[in-house]
Image (tube, helix red, strand yellow):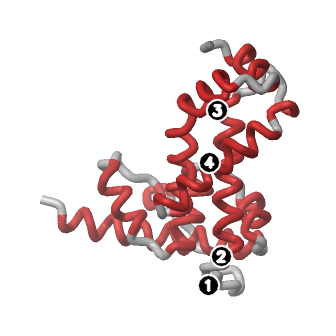
Amino acid sequence: MSNTPQLIKACQANSYAAQLEVFNTYKGLLYTAAIRILKRPSLAQDVVQEAFIKGFQKIDDLDLNSNLGAWLYRIATNMSLDVLRKEQRFDWQEEEDTTVAFTPEEDQTDELPLKLMQEALDELKEQHRLVVVLYAIEGYSHKEIAQHLELKESTVRNQYRRAKLALKAAIEKKLKTCP
């Protein structure tokens, strides 16, 4: 069953075969979303499982012409954020605005090897890495991130600015050590 509207309809009818197809099709996508945010494989796997359960429970609310993968991805991302918020693992700095002006030349980079970029991202403080992942990779707005993490929007903006500076420094350090 590769036709998405038919697949959604079959899942709404509680078809095990359709649910299994959805699971097999989207489990990697959801795991990618969860692991980017949580960085812990066992926790990411739990979130994926819970995201599918929640998705199948709410599939009746989904329009037949919806993008099923994007919908499930968003559920997994939101559940991952909920896990982090409940753990309250971060020391968010709520300081006054420390806006840093970037010139276009500073904000542009040549293409970097993905591995180097991932290594630099992994070196960031957890809260910086999370804000970069959510904003730059997942496409959340500062306001959405603030709502999910129960922070002020200005705090998220400041953390993103700090994260960009830290990421830039980590990338430059890695580039100097590359052969």
> Which of 150 and 29 lies nearest the eye of the viewer?
29
Q: CA distance from mark 3 to mark 4?
A: 15 Å
Side (left or right) of 145 relative to 34: right
Q: Residue at x 34, y 46 (%)?
A: 111
Instruction: Assess whether mark 1 and mark 3 are in contact (beta carbons under 8 angstroms).
Output: no
Q: Amino acid at mark 3?
A: Gly
Q: Earlier in the sequence, mark 3 or mark 1?
A: 3
The quarter of the rendered structure image containing the N terminus is top right
Q: Amino acid at mark 4?
A: Gln
User: In the rendered image of this protein, does residue 11 appear above or below residue 34?
Assistant: above
**Disc ID at residue 69:** 3
Q: Residue at x 70, y 71 (%)?
A: 85
User: In the rendered image of this protein, does residue 100 appear above or below residue 9?
Assistant: below
Q: Residue at x 87, y 33 (%)?
A: 61
Q: Position of residue 125 (x, y in %)?
A: 48, 76
Q: Earlier in the sequence, mark 1 or mark 4?
A: 4
Query: Which residue is under mark 2?
Result: 87
Query: Which residue is under mark 4?
Result: 49
Q: Amino acid at mark 1?
A: Asp
- What number of labels is visible? 4
Query: Which residue is under mark 1?
Result: 91
Q: Amino acid at mark 2?
A: Glu
Q: In which quarter of the view is residue 90 placed?
A: bottom right
Q: Nearer the viewer, mark 3 or mark 1?
A: 3
Q: Nearer the viewer, mark 3 or mark 4?
A: 4
